[in-house]
Amino acid sequence: DTGVSQDPRHKITKRGQNVTFRCDPISEHNRLYWYRQTLGQGPEFLTYFQNEAQLEKSRLLSDRFSAERPKGSFSTLEIQRTEQGDSAMYLCASSVGQGRRLQLNEKLFFGSGTQLSVL
Amino acid sequence: LAKTTQPISMDSYEGQEVNITCSHNNIATNDYITWYQQFPSQGPRFIIQGYKTKVTNEVASLFIPADRKSSTLSLPRVSLSDTAVYYCLVGDRSNSNSGYALNFGKGTSLLVTP
């Protein structure tokens, strides 16, 4: 099963440190999304890529958050100078999409997420 | 911006049919309605999607009335493994340049017991 893969599954870090998460989407999927989920809440959209182009990043929570997808395959999400409020599950999803605009009828395939704990 | 309202939680016994209703009074003409399921420590999983009337697949049925202001996810004969959070999604056009941002809301937490 070549689903969406995320690494690491768990990350514990100290406040002020930088962290980077990796996502490997389903191979033929051209769109890749990052979400954040806190306890008791639904996933919150952060950013998305179509191939290597980051077409939406206004939802990134602050300038400490950045994401890349340099070759249109895997993606990384980096959080600089982590804060305790960054503790959450970070989810990656991928899909096959046409055009440059997100469509609601796209079906997203999610990974199991990276659980970040900032001490 | 089409917001959704779902019950926070529901309880059911094994073998019963469960219906979860989602209200989306401001749904736009070209919005689809999509449901996802999420187990603890996993990402959401697509269940079903529809635009109008009824859609059925091997997992669930989705009923959408003519005015499309609500939808009902129907899970037949639930088992313990159906215990999960169920999310209803419709359009979120908060950024018209990028299309829809697919936000999930808080969902409905379904607990199935023996």
Image (spheres, coloured by chain):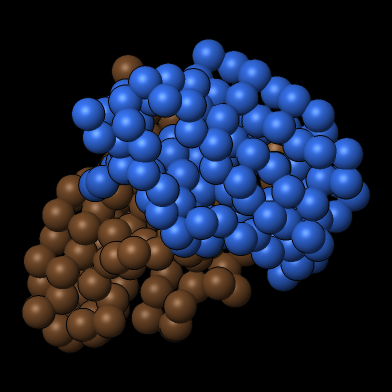
Chain colours: A brown, B blue
Quadrant that contains the C terminus of chain B: top left
For residue A1, which quarter of the picture?
top left
Instruction: Identify the residue shown where x is 10% and y is 66%.
Output: A12
Q: Is residue A104 visible?
A: yes
Q: Position of residue A65 (x, y in %)?
A: 40, 74
Residue at image position (11%, 72%) is: A13
Identify the residue at image location x=82%, y=33%.
B52
| Number of numbered callouts drawn | 0
Query: In terms of image quadrants, where is residue B56?
Result: top right
- Toward the top, the furthest residue is B58
Relative to A24, say whether B4 is above or below. below
Tell me: A105 left or right of B18: right
Residue ID at (71%, 32%): B63
Name the residue nearer the viewer: A66 or B95.
B95
Q: Position of residue A10 (x, y in %)?
A: 14, 54
* Above or below, comparing residue B87 to residue A80 in the picture: above
Residue B58 lies, in percent from the top left, at 53, 14
Q: Position of residue A97 (x, y in %)?
A: 67, 37
Residue nearer the viewer, A28 or A45:
A45
Q: Can residue A95 be spotted in the picture?
A: no
* Above or below: residue A119 compared with residue B4: below
B66 and B97: which one is in front?
B66
Q: Quadrant of the N terminus of chain B?
A: bottom right
